[in-house]
Amino acid sequence: MDLNAPAIDIRDLNKFYGSFQALRGISLTVRKGERVVVCGPSGSGKSTMIRCINQLEEHDSGDIRVFGTLLDDSLGSIDEIRREVGMVFQHFNLFPHMTVLENCTLAPMLVRKTPRAEAERVALKYLEKVRILDQAAKYPGQLSGGQQQRVAIARALCMQPEILLFDEPTSALDPEMIAEVLDVMVALANEGMTMICVTHEMGFARKVADRVIFMDKGEIVEEAPPAAFFGKPQNERTKLFLSQVL
Ligand code: ADP
Ligand code: MG
């Protein structure tokens, strides 16, 4: 891994599900410390792109580099990615039979071979950061959706990733819980975390994004800093989308 290389560098990425092409020649470079928000209609390929970056899906052609390391199907590159790229999902994906603390220590102990005491020390630090330390001994099912998502963010942070990917982290939450999750994400953004966030929270995009990307039908249609993106969208498809979400 070369920390001077772009955090993420995608060149002409194509992805098919059977004969259906979900990604069409996606190219995207994200610098270390950059905060990118991705929006677009349902089915436009946002999750597929994020999942390809994290190697949860295999791509058909094109290159993805993470800090200079080319993702191929070798175990070495998948391992490296799993360590450096954290992922937060819409439905939290916590392990229901494990406590909050165990959810946070599992991957560091298994993947990073961190001793339990050290893994717990780090986990408690991040649970405090997402303001959920008092729930460390609970099971996910005992928590609200907003609390579960904050645990999921802490769990991702426990691997001490260089990059965090978020796929609609607030879409499954009741309105009163969205703000508590966004607050945590804003704090991370302000600390310089490299982030790609798929979200329709345009207030969040305006506040923290360096760049907003609009995807439609498997393509990146438009990208610009938030002021230009919201103030002067260029593409008709972007304008239509924004008229529906703003
Ligand atoms: P988004 O996240 O923007 O809503 P997705 O990346 O989930 O879009 O999906 C893009 C397109 O690929 C959609 O048309 C979806 O139906 C299709 N798709 C996603 N996952 C699969 C899959 N596992 N098998 C077949 N088609 C899929
Ligand atoms: Mg999606």
Image (spheres, rainbow, N blue to C red):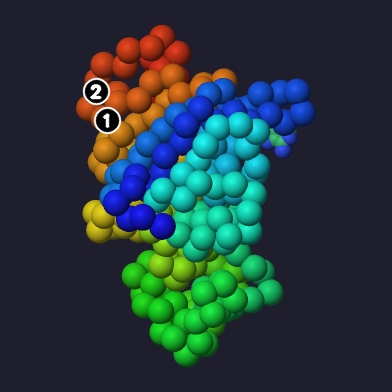
| Residue 112 visible from this viewpoint | yes
Which element is circle 2 on?
helix
Assign a secondary structure to mark 1.
Answer: helix
Q: Which mark is residue 228?
A: 2
Specify whether 190 is left or right of 244.
left
Name the residue rendered at 47%, 31% in the picture.
11
As drawn, the label of residue 9 is none
Q: Does 50 appear above or below 61?
A: below
- Is residue 134 among the parts visible in the rendering? no
Q: In the image, residue 134 lies at what x, y percent?
A: 43, 79
- Vertical relation: 28 (above or below) 133: above
User: Where is residue 58 shown, x and y percent of the image?
Assistant: 65, 42
Viewer-side residue, 60 vs 246: 60
Q: Is residue 49 left or right of residue 178?
A: right
Residue at image location 64% in from the left, 76% down from the top: 98
Label 1 residue near ligand 1, CB within 8 Å: no
Residue at 39% over, 29% down: 213
Q: Residues within 10 Å of mark 1 (few under 14, many from 20)?
A: many
Q: Residues within 10 Å of mark 2 (few under 14, many from 20)?
A: few
Give the total number of marks visible in the rendering.
2
Name the residue: 61% across, 31% down: 61
Q: Give the CA separation, mark 2 to mark 1.
A: 5 Å
Residue identifier under label 1: 226
Q: Nearer the viewer, residue 85 or 126?
A: 85
Amino acid type at image mark 1? Pro
Residue 9: percent from left, percent from top:
42, 39
Residue sitting farthest toward the right: 18
Label 2 is placed on what type of residue?
Ala
Question: For residue 77, what is the image quadrant?
Answer: bottom right
Q: Are marks 2 and 1 in contact (CB under 8 Å)?
A: yes
